[in-house]
Image (cartoon, helix red, strand yellow):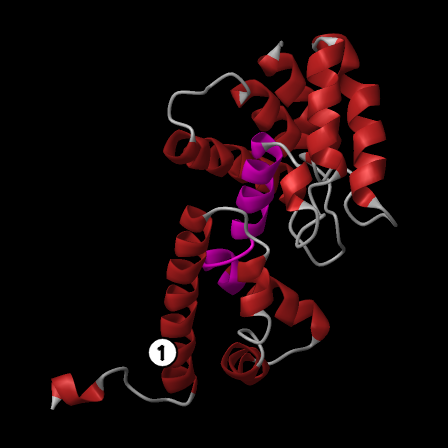
Amino acid sequence: MDMQAIKKIAFENMGNKSSHEFKEKGNKFYHGERVAVLALRLRKIILPNDDSHDEIITVAAWFHDIMNGGDNHPQEGTMKARELIYSYCSAEEMDEICDIISVHDDRGAGHEAFSVYTKLHQDADQLDHFGTFDIWMSFIYAVPHNQTINDVRDWFISERSKNNERYRSELNFEISRRIFDEKMEFVEYFANRFDVEVSGGIWKEEQFQ
């Protein structure tokens, strides 16, 4: 595959656009870049001797959210990716890329039917939405939605963790669940410190007394 040309096409179609009004320019292009890197890092842990699908995993990650915001963005994204890059890869490669894109959001059911490469993508995609990304998204969402810093604090304290068990259960690999747990520990630490400092307090004040 002509990876340089394919990535250029991805940027041309996503690099200067936002998937939602309040999100930053190029958000889905940069998300795709991170998912590609993370998926390959997971692959090196889970399948250390199998780099046969690294380019397919990478291209699928770059394009998986190209139609995000639509009614059925996995299926729409599959068609859009095929339209844009079919001439830069073989028919077999194109089919595998589209297979990954088409089911990347199908979590929690039918996992056994998916290839290991699809599962790597699914976990990388899921994991990229947690940890520091939680913090980033909460603040870029807050201002255009007229939320105060106290509103954000309350969301972190009372709402953020409500669906963690479901998100965790949707991951395919034990290493992914361990990474998710570490991310949640970090967010909990941030939320607790944020709660103290938003109220004018000093984190671990006793150490200064």
Q: Is residue 204 magenta?
A: no
- Seen at 79% across and 35% down, the residue is 77
Dominant SS type (magenta)? helix
Residue 41 pos. (x, y %): 42, 34
Q: Is residue 55 found left or right of 187 in the rendered image? A: right
Q: Which residues are magenta?
A: 116-135
Residue 170: quarter of image: bottom right
Task: Indicate the amino acid at tag 1.
Answer: Arg
Residue 98: quarter of image: top right
From this viewpoint, is residue 26 visible? no
Query: Looking at the image, which residue sits at the far right?
Result: 71
Say above or below: 128 vs 39. Answer: below
From this viewpoint, is residue 123 visible? yes
Say above or below: 4 vs 67. Answer: above
- Seen at 52% across and 22% down, the residue is 54
Q: Which residue is mark 1?
A: 193
The quarter of the picture where the C terminus appears is: bottom left
Q: Is residue 109 found left or right of 125 in the rendered image? A: right
Say above or below: 201 vs 15. Answer: below
Residue 148 pos. (x, y %): 59, 81
Q: Is residue 21 found left or right of 168 in the rendered image? A: right
- Seen at 60% across and 62% down, the residue is 140
Is disc 1 placed on a helix, strand or loop?
A: helix
Query: Looking at the image, which residue sits at the far front?
Result: 112
Residue 194 pos. (x, y %): 41, 78
Mark 1 surroundings within 10 Å by alpha-carbon count, few (fewer than 14), some (14 through 19), many (20 or more): some
Residue 38 pos. (x, y %): 47, 38
